[in-house]
Each structure stands twice: as structure tokens, then as C-alpha cells.
Image (tube, rainbow, N blue to C red):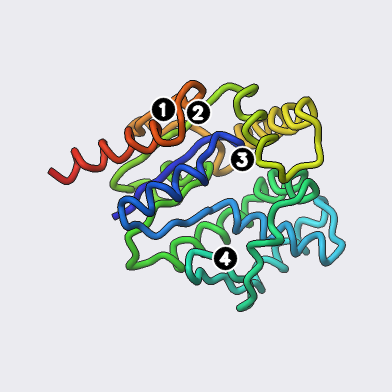
Amino acid sequence: MIVAIDGPAGVGKSTIAKKIADKASLFYVNSGNFYRAITLEVIKNELTINDTDLIIDLAKRLEFSLINERLHVNKVDIEVKLHSDLIDSLVAQVSSIVNIRRIVNSAIRKTTESLNIIVEGRDISTVVFPNADLKVYLDASIATRAARRHNQGVSTLTLKEIEETILKRDKIDKSKPEGSLKISNDALYLDTSDLTIDEVCDKVLQKLSNMQV
């Protein structure tokens, strides 16, 4: 079973996917963390976004593994290091590199083979798992997404600055040469602006239940 969830930054994909994973006994995978892990390595190695070839070579040397739903790089748990304003500001640009997307897509498929999974990201239902059993696209207004990110308490930015960051991120995500953010024709589209987390989860779980009848 593969459940693919796509949507823009700050829409609540991670929270919703985790809840559905628990209720439906699925293995949760955050595809964005793979890109964040590479971005973390880019920062550690003092590379710039223009060092494309060096970034690709660096990514090829990384060994990804998922243990207890936590991402490990070269056998080290790096989950706690993946969310910072600096990584937030660079990850969309790193993930725009075509060969980086191919490296990550291959890593996701390899680390999840033979598992019943729920995966969330930007191009999961359109590129990574186009034959997923269930495709979901989550959306929400810019204001709602910025407020949710601000309330998480992981950013030092103001609400207005977070809005500007999300707008910039959306522009990059939707214009990527490969793996751009788009709605799959056969996806369940949900605008979550006025829905609670539980209401969104119930709609997805109901769809899953109907599929299994």
C-alpha cells in the first residue's frame, strides 16, 4: 500500500501524514527530510547553491536509511538538525537541482521497498510514486499556512517574514524543471484552510476505507 500526499509548504502534510500513519498502520516517510539532509550537508561543507556539481557529488556519497521512521545519513540520526531558518531558506533551491531530485527519488524508493507507506512531499503522486494506491493533494491559503508555521515555534522569523518565505518557496516549487509542485489528475484535493487536523485525517481515512471495501 502506498499513500502519496502532496502539497505546498506549511500546509500540514507532516502532521496529517503522521496521524494517518498511526491510524492506518502505515510507515511514515517525509520526502522533504531527504532534501533537508542534503542541504544540511551543503551548509556543513560550506558550499553555495551555485556549486551544483559539488552538491551532486556530495549527495551521491550519502547513505540514507530509515530507522523507526527517522532519517539517518551515513548511519547517524540527523532528524533533530533538519529544521532551521537557514535550511528553510536554501532547501527549495537545493531540491530544484534535477540530479538531486533523481538521487532523492531513488533513495526514497529504495528505503521503502516492501513497506506499506504514507509519503508526503511535492511530487510524490506525480513523479516518485505515480502508481500510488491513493493520492492526496493538501492545500491552504498563504495566511493559514504562515500562521501554522509561526505557531510551531521553530522559526525566529516574524509572521510576515514567514509569509514571504512561503511565497518564495511556492514560486520555486511550482517552477522546478523536474518534479514541480502540481495536482495529480486522480488526487483527492482537500483545502484545509478551515478544517482541523482531525477533520482532514478523517476524510483521507474514509477514502482509504472505501477503497478497501
What residue type is disc 1 on? Answer: Leu
- Pointer 4 with pointer 2, Cβ within 8 A: no
Q: Nearer the viewer, mark 3 or mark 2?
A: 2
- Give SS at disc 2: strand
What residue type is disc 3 on? Answer: Pro
Residues at marks 3 and 4, CA–CA distance in whole angstroms:
26 Å
- Residue 33 in percent (x, y) is at 60, 56
Label 4 belongs to which residue?
71
Give the side of residue 196 with respect to residue 43, left or right. left
What residue type is disc 4 on? Answer: Leu
Report the disc number at residue 177.
3
- Residue 182 in percent (x, y) is at 50, 32
Label 2 belongs to which residue?
139
- Pointer 2 with pointer 1, Cβ within 8 A: yes
- Pointer 3 with pointer 2, Cβ within 8 A: no
Give the side of residue 157 with respect to residue 172, left or right. right
- Give SS at disc 4: strand
Disc on the earlier residue, 3 or 1: 3
Residues at marks 3 and 1, CA–CA distance in whole angstroms:
26 Å
Instruction: Name the quadrant containing residue 40.
Output: bottom right
- Given residues 8 and 85, the one toward you in this image is 85
Give the residue at x 32% y 57%.
Answer: 25
Pointer 3 local density, CA inside 10 Å: few below 14, some 14–19, many at least 20:
few
